[in-house]
Image: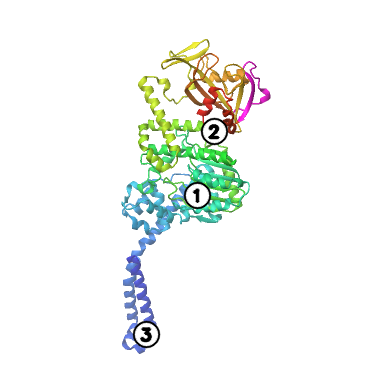
Amino acid sequence: MKPVVKKLLGGLIFGFVVIVLQHFAGESWGVVGRFNNSPIGRALTTIAISGLFIPAAKELLPYIQRGTFLARLLKVLEELARERRSLESAEHQQRFLRLYGNRQIDRSFIEEMKPEDAACFVLGLQFYYSKLKIAPDVGTSEFVLCAERAAQNETYRIILLELALGTTLIPEAVEASKFTRTLLAKHSGMLDVRLRSEDEDEKFFGRLSGASKERLTVFSTTSQISSASIGVLSQFSSRIERLDLYLVSPLVRTDEALGLLSEEYDVPACAIPQVQFLENRTFDIVRRVFRVLMAIEAALQLKQQTGIDVRLFVFRRRYPNLKVRLLKERNYMQVLPGSLRYANNLYRFGLEFTDKEVIERMDRAVQEMQSNQRLITQVLLDRVHVEKLKADALREVYWYVVGRGEDVGALESLIHQFGLVLKNPSTRQYVDSLLVLDRAAKAAVENHDFIAVPKEAPTPNMIHNSDSKMAVGSIVVKKYGGRSVKHLSVGVLFVADSRVLMIRKKQKPYEGKWSLIAGHVEEGETARQAIEREVLEELGVPLLEAEFLRRFPIVDGDICRHGADCHEWYVFVSSQVLRMESLKLSSDEISELEWMPFGNLASLDADGVFTFATRFLLKGLGLL
């Protein structure tokens, strides 16, 4: 018990005893009784009580003033959040440092914090921690305790929800503020979201167990869909009709969202979970990219194994700072705001909902957000598009690391740390991919073969007419190694509904074999121009939409009708809608065409139906 409280209680008890004595004391007490009830006696008694009570009250006054000061500060921050302004301001800093700047922030101080005090501390610590005296004994557990206390404060919950909803989900400030108060008024309970707590999972999957043809919506930064959750969701596959999964985009240069999460590093050490992050900030961004790619791979696995209609969306500009799990048919939702700069699994709070009107309002907001292509984009969840996204993400994170002056080769020595944090066998594969890129880039610089360096502008846009290349007839060939030449070739995968378009060849040496739409690069053409020409020649329609997928520098043993047995391939992918009745097949080269399901390619390959190059390319793209 604090000394000021002891003094106050002592004064109250003493005063109570004296008043009782005055009430019962009378003539029977003789002189003492008469004096006690006299004006002078009562005056002396009052002075005695005041001597004990008033000093204690004076000491209590700062606590009363502090409570008023805290309440005013929270109202200021609430107003900033409502107006979509940063919580970081001169007024906030001045008030925060007045509260905490002149004392040691140690474990006992944090343990004694009340919810209002903890709320002000958590909200300000993210900006002004460098100006505080934080004791060495303050760690993650103390920060989590402080955040749990803060979450008991109503204004703190309003601020976090206002900030989270306004990031991307509900852009109109007044509507976000109104919905915030609706959420806080109509939630059906608080969730225990502490580290290692399974409360939210148990409640969520408990609701899912009674579902039928459920449409499930999940917001996550990276790892909500993992190998562990794949197993759980697979058990409920007969109850889930559709899963809409929202992750942060793994592209660190094209998109901004993942890079902005690095603000989680600019906080005190007590707010950084060491078991989750890597110490090197640049390489920790690499870890985040890996984790997103693993989640995407797990989502594809879930779709292939269960038949659930899994739809993947990625946040491009910013993560919405809101973890959401919504069961549309069961009328159940969990909302966990995480809108501060700390790693949000350390401080966020959770609410659950069963109110149909609230859940439908959240679902509408999610659907409206999907239409904003600047904020969010859908990734087609099939092997071709996933492989392309992985290749793009690894290339971009490679240049991200190089651009920050780090040696990509150092990843080899960090593989153990990556493995401990990510706990996924794909870690080795991703690290190896970056090391291959690094070796290729360094070798290209040393050999002055800058064409081989991974480039921001895709190699397919280069015109192949340099001195290292020559034309045989109209076919472009390229000198390489100790061998004479290799042909430059292009191909395109037309994909739709997890199927790829194949043509059956008419001409030798692959007569009767199935192939991608493909051909040679001719003199003066870029690879893109070449594939546009080939599609027009073979299908009779223009190629309106195609993205570069991957370059295969050496495909050895790939014999073509022009006599070469080695090719350099540039592969594109297209989701262009092809109307079969509009196609005009080249009668010289194609006998028939067919849309082949991805799932059937392996069995067809066992029958030897593909050309050498098609088999090589499909295998290289992970389709075989």
Residue range highlighted in magenta: 575-596
Percent position of residue 568, x then y: 48, 20
Position of the N terminus, as image quadrant, is bottom left
Secondary-structure class at tag 1: strand
In this rendering, the label closer to the viewer, 2 or 3: 2
Percent position of residue 86, x then y: 44, 44
The verdict on residue 582 being magenta is yes
The three-letter amino acid code for the residue at tag 3 is: Ala
Q: Nearer the viewer, residue 205 or 14?
A: 205
Total residue callouts: 3
Q: Is residue 446 above or below residue 623?
A: above
The three-letter amino acid code for the residue at tag 1 is: Leu
The three-letter amino acid code for the residue at tag 2 is: Arg
* Upstream in sequence: badge 2 or badge 1: 1
Do we see residue 523 in this rendering? no
The verdict on residue 193 being magenta is no
Secondary-structure class at tag 2: helix
- Return the residue at label 2: 383
Do we see residue 25 in this rendering? yes
Q: How is the image coloured?
A: rainbow
- Return the residue at label 1: 336
Q: Residues within 10 Å of mark 1 (few under 14, many from 20)?
A: many
Position of the C terminus, as image quadrant, is top right
Tell me how far mark 2 sits from mark 3, CA to CA.
95 Å
- Return the residue at label 3: 25
